[in-house]
Every structure is written in C-alpha cells, then in structure tokens.
Image (cartoon, helix red, strand yellow):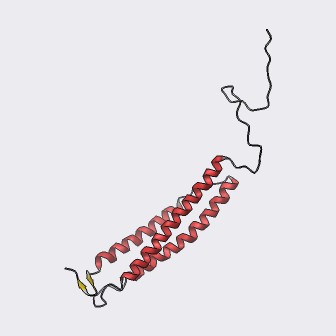
Amino acid sequence: MTQSTQTTDAPIDRDGAIAPAPPSDPQKKPASRTRDHLANERTYLAWMRTAIALIGFGVLIARLRYLVSPDVPGTGQGWLVGLGLSSIGLITVLLSTWHYFAVLDAIETNTYEPNSRWVILFSLVVTLLGAGVLYVLFSVPATVKGFSVM
C-alpha cells in the first residue's frame, strides 16, 4: 500500500490543519475592521446625544430665569450656567466630529491608539457645570412669578 502526500502552499496551523486563505479581493474589508468602524460610529452618535442633552439643559436652565421673580435676590446668574452647558454642548459636537474622523483614519491605516485625555477633560468640565447647576438650583429661593412656594 502506498501513501500519497499532498503538498499545498496554504499555511498550516500548529494542529496540522490548513488555515483559511486570506481574502482574494483587496477591496473587501475583514469583519473585524467593519466592526471597528461600526463601533466608531456608535461612539460618535453617543457623543452627539450627549451634546444635544447638554445644549437642551443649557437652554432650559437659561430660560428658567424668566420663571423666577426679578424681585428675588440672587436669581440673575443662572443664565451663565445655561450658557456654559450650551457652549460645552457645541464644543462637544466639534470635538466628537474631529475625533470620529481621526479614529476613522487610524482604523484605515491600522495605527489606532486609545487616548483617555479627552474623556478625562470632558468629565471634569461636565462635573463642574453640574455642580454649578446644583448650586443655582439650591441657592435660588423657591419663589416663582405668580406663585409662592412655602
């Protein structure tokens, strides 16, 4: 009985099985790269939702000053917190768009390195603005035009 041996050019893994051949179409992206791009888009959309929420809260806080009687002392600075939140929301739109395209290029060139600097900075800014909102909320007397809350 003779045994025939076959020779192939395909790579063989450590178990002796033939590894799958790489895709022959250079335009076709591997599945992991597609997942990376989809994750980048989900992250971008999450930042956009955050920006919209910040802008919305900023507008709400700025508009609440019209509900408070001008006769009540200490009610004139709430609009600054609202302006700050809205401004941070607009900056978030710009930075997240820039970051999306930077990550897109890094994925395409296979040079992506995670960076936590922006996350830390953004977290600190939002924490400070949140503290400002709480300060305004609890320092303003509970008197609304036409109503007196006891």
x, y percentage for residue 57? 42, 74
Seen in the picture, residue 25 relative to 12 is either above or below; the reply is: below
Question: Which residue is depicted at the point 66% across and 57% down?
Answer: 106
x, y percentage for residue 121? 49, 66
Left or right: where 65 falls relative to 72:
right
Question: Which residue is depicted at the point 37% across and 74% down?
Answer: 132
x, y percentage for residue 12? 72, 30
x, y percentage for residue 30? 68, 47
Question: Which residue is depicted at the point 41% across and 72% down?
Answer: 129
Q: Residue furthest front?
A: 146
Numbered marks: total: 0
Q: Residue furthest left?
A: 150
Seen in the picture, residue 94 relative to 72 is either above or below; the reply is: above
Q: Residue furthest top?
A: 1
Left or right: where 26 falls relative to 33:
right
User: In the rendered image, which quarter contains the N terminus?
Assistant: top right
User: In the rendered image, which quarter contains the C terminus?
Assistant: bottom left
Question: Which residue is depicted at the point 36% across and 81% down?
Answer: 64
